[in-house]
Image (spheres, coloured by chain):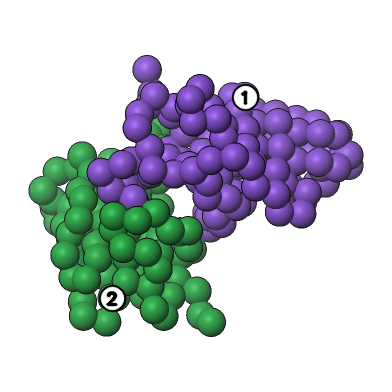
């Protein structure tokens, strides 16, 4: 069974640009969540999706957005990039619904560098 | 004060030693997760627990809901156990809305 796949794995952008990251969950998993990891702030929750609906959102500005498609694949977008957006972005999937806690399976992450 | 606190932040030990990492939290949770992160970034879920104790190989995780405290133990530690161990809690209002501890960097010397 394939794991959680995140693309791209590495990318470099400049300030002001926008970026889209993709996450393909494990087959059969309908819950997808996104997290940001930086050296200063550690790991922080971004969004949680289930059945194409955003269930929860973390404390991030509106420049950070996401969506989930009918096949459970998810994308997150960051617009007007800032230097502080440089981070490892991790996606996780779970077989459980948003209201039930299931084991999380993480992707390898997308490492974004903003110059 | 952070909602999830881990101790110690750094731990260096010799191969074979018994390791304990602690996690305390101050919020209502639906579950607690222990995660492992190796250099390079990938995160692996070690345990998810909401009560009692779980064991997997040389790893043991316990949680005391009344005291809002969890421990991760590693028996017969090995250099390949060297990694960052992260405690995270699932908030009651959103199972995947995790709040993370700052992590414990474990180094096991041969």
Residue B57 visible somewhere in the drawing: yes
B24 and A12: which is toward the camera = B24
> Residue A26 falls in which quadrant of the image?
bottom left
Q: How far apart are marks 1 and 2 (CA)?
A: 38 Å
Q: The residue marked by circle 1 belongs to what chain? A: B
Q: Residue, x 27% and y 82% (percent of image)?
A: A71
Q: The residue marked by circle 2 belongs to what chain? A: A
Q: In terms of secondary structure, where does tag 1 sit?
A: loop
What hue does chain B carry in this figure?
A: purple
Q: Residue, x 43% and y 58% (percent of image)?
A: A102
A90 and B70: which is toward the camera = B70
Q: In terms of secondary structure, where does tag 2 sit?
A: loop
In the image, residue A95 sits, relative to residue B90, either above or below, namely below
What hue does chain A carry in this figure?
A: green
B97 and A74: which is toward the camera = B97
In the image, residue B4 sits, relative to residue A34, either above or below, namely above
In contact (CB < 8 Å): disc 1 and disc 2:
no
Q: Name the residue under label 1.
A: B8
Farthest residue, direction top? B1
Q: Residue A4 carries which label?
A: none
| Total marks placed | 2
> Residue B34 falls in which quadrant of the image?
top right
Q: Mark 2 points at which residue?
A: A72
> Residue A9 falls in which quadrant of the image?
bottom left
Q: Residue, x 53% and y 82% (percent of image)?
A: A1
């Amino acid at each position: 069974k394939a794991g959680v796949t995140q693309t791209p794995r590495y990318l470099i952008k400049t300030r002001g640009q926008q970026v889209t990251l993709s996450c393909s969950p494990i087959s059969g998993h309908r819950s997808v969540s996104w997290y940001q990891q930086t050296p200063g702030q550690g790991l922080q929750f971004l969004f949680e999706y289930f059945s194409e609906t955003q269930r929860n959102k973390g404390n991030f500005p509106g420049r950070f957005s996401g969506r989930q498609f009918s096949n459970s694949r998810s994308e997150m977008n960051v617009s007007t990039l800032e230097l502080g957006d440089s981070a490892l972005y991790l996606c996780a999937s779970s077989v459980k619904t948003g209201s039930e806690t299931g084991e999380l399976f993480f992707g390898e992450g997308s490492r974004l560098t903003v110059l | 004060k952070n909602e999830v606190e881990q101790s110690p932040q750094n731990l260096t030990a010799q191969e074979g030693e018994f390791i304990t990492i602690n996690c305390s939290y101050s919020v209502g949770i639906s579950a607690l997760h222990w995660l492992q992160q190796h250099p390079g970034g990938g995160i692996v879920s070690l345990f998810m627990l909401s009560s009692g104790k779980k064991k997997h190989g040389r790893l043991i995780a316990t949680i005391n809901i009344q005291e809002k405290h969890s421990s991760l133990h590693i028996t017969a530690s090995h250099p390949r156990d060297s990694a960052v161990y992260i405690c995270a809690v699932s908030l009651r209002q959103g199972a995947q809305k995790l709040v993370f501890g700052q992590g414990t960097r474990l180094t096991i010397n041969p």
